[in-house]
Image (cartoon, rainbow, N blue to C red):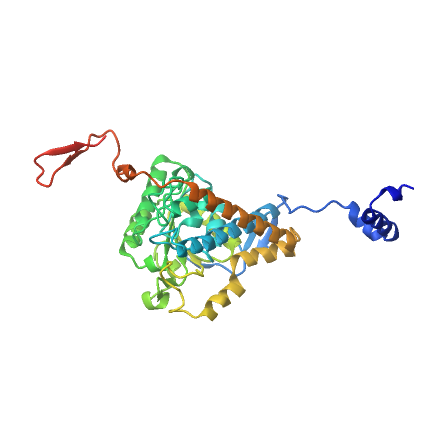
């Protein structure tokens, strides 16, 4: 009689469970959630570290299931953000220069896992994902890219000038290599203040031959500053292969008297281990150079198709063999921290978050034209503005 009050589908399910005890047992087991366990586990890096004038870290990296899942989510978010930026640029909603980071996400994520927000990061113009890793939001990213008020630099910086001082992110710099001496200056301030924090100054292989790099490194080593110079070697300075621009492309050895470490920059765990080692070294002994062996899938900028100086087979080969997200996906699945479906569902949710952020960014207004004159001079100094002949004071800035 009780069965007669059930729907036909419910009755059928009850019969199935009575006939098949395995099905009944499976139904009784609650659905397993994606692992948030913080129990330490040890994973070995994909390849050994290459060292110069130092012993180098262990290949065995301590991590947790929660961290590995967060690595996957954060890198997938960065990848989706950059792909969306590509589409927005082609739709002319992003104008000017735009340099995408897809392929290099493991550097941003691994570095962040090894340090705190009191440590500083300063980088070049490929800065979107570094900003996101420092705690920036998707809304701030897309608003800045589209020149809107809600952007991290109030819509005045654009792609190359993201900034988040409260989290120790000092940009986003358009002049090739110019951020390196600024980074050493941040490290000088940290040492002067006895902060026990470090600065990571990032640059590409294209900037690795800049004279200012060696000048800054020299004085940083003389003063034992807590500066970590990070060469993100994606193997092409714009369209020039590293071997055509550098007699010695072993960038981690280029510091001579400064120790160096070559890292698989497509392995988030290797990056984490190297950055942890570098921070400990810099606080005790001064500067160290990290060379991140990485790869960008897009061209140098949106005006570069990225296929005239390298083959499509080369790009697809790196995607298949070294992609940082796929590496973490395989690790998460092999350790049974999540199912394939759960990771795909996570990616769908990320796509929705990105789409929602873009929609909100489009609603943000453009900056008022008067904003052209703000954030230029420090206020309260009574700076005087003269005419061309310097005879007449035209204005006194607030």
Quarter containing the C terminus: top left
What is the x, y in percent for residue 110? 49, 50
Residue positioned 27% across, 56% down in the render: 211
Residue 227 in view: no
Q: Nearer the viewer, residue 268 or 74?
A: 74
Locate residue 370 relative to residue 163 in the image: left or right: left
What is the x, y in percent for residue 175? 29, 52
Q: Nearer the viewer, residue 242 or 216?
A: 242
What is the x, y in percent for residue 249? 37, 64
Location of residue 194 (image quadrant):
top left
Locate residue 59 relative to residue 312 in the image: left or right: right
Residue positioned 51% across, 53% down in the render: 268
Q: Nearer the viewer, residue 93 or 187?
A: 93
Residue 11 in view: yes
What is the x, y in percent for residue 34? 64, 47
Locate residue 197 relative to residue 211 in the image: left or right: right
Residue positioned 56% across, 58% down in the render: 327
Locate residue 299 relative to residue 325 in the image: left or right: left
Quarter containing the N terminus: top right
Q: How many numbered circles are shown?
A: 0
Location of residue 6 (image quadrant):
top right
Residue positioned 54% across, 56% down in the render: 325
Q: Is residue 367 above or below residue 260?
A: above
């Amino acid at each position: 009689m009780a069965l007669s009050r059930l729907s036909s589908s419910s009755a059928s399910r009850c019969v199935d469970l009575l006939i098949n005890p395995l099905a009944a047992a499976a139904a009784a087991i609650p659905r397993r959630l994606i692992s948030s366990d913080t129990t330490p586990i040890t994973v070995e890096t994909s390849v050994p570290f290459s060292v110069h004038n130092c012993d180098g870290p262990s290949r065995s990296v301590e991590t947790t299931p929660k961290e590995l899942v967060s690595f996957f989510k954060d890198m997938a978010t960065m990848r989706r953000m950059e792909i969306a930026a590509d589409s927005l640029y082609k739709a002319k909603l992003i104008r000017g220069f735009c340099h995408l980071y897809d392929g290099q996400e493991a550097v941003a994520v691994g570095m962040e896992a090894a340090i705190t927000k009191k440590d500083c990061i300063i980088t070049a113009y490929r800065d979107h994902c570094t900003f996101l890793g420092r705690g920036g939001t998707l809304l701030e990213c897309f608003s800045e890219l589209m020149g809107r008020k809600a952007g991290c630099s109030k819509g005045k910086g654009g792609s190359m000038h993201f900034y988040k001082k409260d989290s120790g992110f000092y940009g986003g710099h358009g002049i090739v290599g110019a951020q390196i001496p600024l980074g050493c200056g941040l490290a000088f301030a940290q040492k002067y203040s006895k902060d026990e924090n470090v600065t990571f100054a990032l640059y590409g292989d294209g900037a690795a031959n800049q004279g200012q790099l060696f000048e800054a490194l020299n004085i940083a080593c003389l003063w034992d500053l807590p500066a970590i110079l990070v060469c993100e070697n994606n193997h092409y300075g714009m369209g020039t292969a590293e071997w055509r621009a550098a007699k010695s492309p072993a960038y981690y050895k280029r510091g001579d008297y400064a120790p160096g470490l070559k890292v698989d920059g497509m392995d988030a765990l290797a990056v984490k281990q190297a950055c942890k080692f570098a921070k400990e070294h810099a606080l005790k002994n001064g500067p160290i150079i990290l060379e991140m062996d990485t790869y960008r899938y897009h061209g140098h900028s949106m005006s570069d198709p990225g296929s005239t100086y390298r083959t499509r087979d080369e790009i697809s080969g790196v995607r298949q063999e070294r992609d940082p997200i796929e590496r973490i996906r395989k690790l998460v699945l092999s350790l049974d921290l999540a199912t394939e479906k759960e990771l795909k569902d996570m990616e769908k949710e990320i796509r929705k978050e990105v789409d929602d952020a873009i929609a909100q960014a489009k609603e943000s207004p453009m900056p008022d034209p008067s904003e052209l004159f703000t954030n230029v001079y420090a206020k309260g100094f009574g700076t005087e503005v003269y005419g061309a002949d310097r005879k007449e004071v035209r204005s006194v800035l607030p």
